Image (cartoon, rainbow, N blue to C red):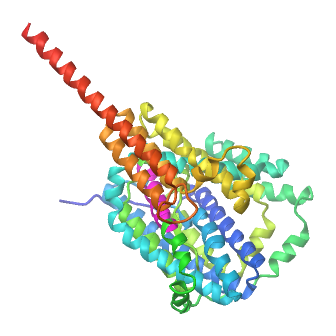
Amino acid sequence: MSTKVIHYPLYKKEDTDAFFALFQNNLANFVVIAVTMLGMGFPASIVFGKVIPGAAVAVMVGNLYYAYMAKRLAEKEGRTDVTALSYGISTPVMFVFLFGVLAPANALTGDPELAWKIGVAAALLSGLVEVLVSFSGNWVRDRLPRAAMLGAIAGVALTFVAGEMLFNTFSIPVVGLVSLAIILVGIVAKIAMPFKIPASLFAVLTGTILAFALGYQSPSQITDGLANIGFYPILPTLAPFEGMTYLFGALIGILAVLIPITLYNAIETMNNVDAMAAAGDSYDVRKCQAVDGVGTMIGALFGGLFPTTVYIATVGSKQMGAGRGYSILNAIVFGIAAMTGVIAAFSAIIPLAAVAPILVFVGMSMVGTAFLSNDKKYYPAVAIAMLPYLANYVMTRFNNAAGEVVAGISTGIVPLGQGAMFTAILLGAMTVAIIDKNFKQAIIFSCIAAFLSFIGFMHAPALAFNAAPDFAIGYLLVAIFLGYASFKEGSEKQLTSANTVTKKIA
């Protein structure tokens, strides 16, 4: 049997728009990491000399491997329109590592270098856990309804991606609105930009020029950024192993944060791969979870301390018509940027309002895909799966003061936002099962929700036995009610069947 030979290009013009979308996403995370760690008191030698290069290694490894996976899929299916998976640091997990791992380690030890070692140890362990979880990736994927998984990730897209980035777009309206219009006209309406410049690049250039021309950016910001330019070699380190003794010693409480957030990361990868399957490119979930875990571990061995994941931006890249070139280019550019300190310069020169519209488009694409790839009858399941992330967004944006700040709105916001990924998927899955009148399956999902609430994966601030008793009891009562619904449905089916037999005999 002959294999069909295809020409799957290494790079094509559509990769340019997708590259800027992915680069901006990763760049934003790198900038947040740098600014936050410097604010915590970590020296620039650790931030720019160890953490940023180590994180770049993880990004490089994953991007290059996913480009290879795209080539394999293209050859296997005889297609040239395969899009490589977008990959980088998981934004929600990044915040957890910054404030749930690094900050307490720094506060308890009073030693930034030791805190960094504990952080990279946590990242190494997180990557290992995700590799182990990968063995069950496809099994879990096959048993969770697509509407639930895509609805959950659409919740992230609506709040943390499209919503957050639209806020940033409107922070400087004369810059953001123009850049947004360019993105919509160039990518959605597919109108060519002047000199055939890719729409995303034209949006960034136009927005940046406007920002400087109108005084929103000053020349001093360029000077500040360029001050960090230098040579930062990418070198392996034994820090993860040195930090591991503390992680399993005085700071063992960090594991209560580490384990659930790693499971969240594995589910995030699963959801994003499933979203890509709905868009037309089906990758092996288990392999992707393993790649994310290995990428995180390799990054930790070079000083990086943030878990990586497949991005929801992949669907946006697919709609842009990207192939594998944007992923390869992202790996190359980030490697160079990390070793030279260019990341700091970029973050100072380019205003966020100029690049945020690219991610607004990505978020819009994800929300649209969640609905379009499901039957209309499952729209309620998609919608309810999106809502926990609205609560999660509100509570995380108020940080530690969330309980007090939002209590006047509703006492349910914080517990709904805690473990939002699990809550979103399970509420969506229960709704799908109810729509299909598969009440036995709905009972299983409700019992799982009760168990996860009991041990603190959902509706609780930390892992503990009897962590959220009211929610555990609530889900169990729901399971009992669903048992009644199952009995009622079975009785009606028997009655309908009996009436049919009677009519035939008559």
Figure check: 262 above or below 56 = above
Q: Nearer the viewer, residue 293 or 341?
A: 293
Most extreme residue toward the top, as rendered?
506
**Residue 302 point in image, percent of width and height:** 56, 85
Q: Nearer the viewer, residue 469 or 389?
A: 469
**Residue at 49% from the left image edge and 40% from the top image edge:** 382
Specify the quadrant that holds the C terminus.
Answer: top left
- Residue 132 seen in the figure: yes
- Residue 358 seen in the figure: no
**Residue at 49% from the left image edge and 59% from the top image edge:** 268
Examine the image and state in which quarter residue 26 appears: bottom right
**Residue 205 point in image, percent of width and height:** 76, 58
**Residue 277 point in image, percent of width and height:** 41, 51
For the magenta stretch, what is the residue range?
261-277
**Residue at 43% from the left image edge and 70% from the top image edge:** 130
Specify the quadrant that holds the N terminus.
Answer: bottom left
Q: Is residue 269 left or right of residue 2?
A: right
Q: Per the image, is 237 magenta?
A: no
Figure check: 43 above or below 213 = below
Q: Per the image, is 270 magenta?
A: yes
Q: Is residue 385 left or right of residue 442?
A: right
**Residue 318 point in image, percent of width and height:** 51, 52
Q: Nearer the viewer, residue 58 or 229?
A: 58
Figure check: 285 above or below 434 = below
Q: Nearer the viewer, residue 386 or 60?
A: 386
Q: Is residue 100 left or right of residue 380?
A: right
Most extreme residue toward the right, as rendered?
215
